Image (spheres, rainbow, N blue to C red):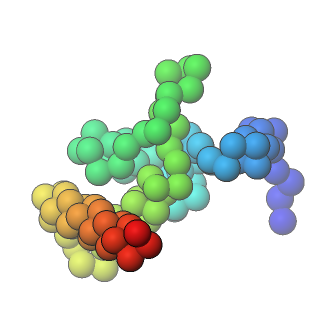
Amino acid sequence: MNNPTSSEIVESAEFIATGIASYSAEVLAEITGTDLEAVLFYQEQGLIKPCESDTSGGAGYDATALRTLRRLEMVKESCGMNVQGLKLLQTLMEEVERLRAELHRAHTS
């Protein structure tokens, strides 16, 4: 196993302190095995959204973007879905998540 880099240590410390991990586009691409160009393309298409900008002007991505990117890449690879299909799928998945949250709130009220 490789030793963590200083930036990985800082990110780990940030996650422990805040409960929120933030990944650069490069780290997000590496974690998911995706090309950096694909990450930036998905962002341009509105399929993944950065959660913050760092001081160098780059975007930071959270666990939601990580899950979304993994799902998009899996569907694209397994189904050969184009960008329009991915956008439709993303919209439907967001609606499902919203409805699940609404149902959960209704059951806990």
Does residue 11 sit above or below 2 in this rendering? Answer: above
Image spot of residue 46 (x, y percent): 26, 44
* Viewer-nearest residue: 108 or 95: 108
The residue at 67%/50% (across/down) is: 19
Image spot of residue 90 (x, y percent): 25, 61
* Viewer-nearest residue: 35 or 47: 47
Image spot of residue 28 (x, y percent): 53, 50
Kindly tell me whether residue 71 is visible in this rendering: no
Q: Quadrant of residue 106?
A: bottom left
Q: Spot the residue most to the front.
A: 109
The residue at 63%/48% (across/down) is: 21
Q: Spot the residue most to the bottom.
A: 78
Does residue 80 sit above or below 26 in this rendering? Answer: below
* Viewer-nearest residue: 76 or 99: 99
Kindly tell me whether residue 49 is visible in this rendering: yes
Does residue 93 sit above or below 24 in this rendering? Answer: below
Quadrant into which the N terminus falls: bottom right
Q: Quadrant of residue 98?
A: bottom left
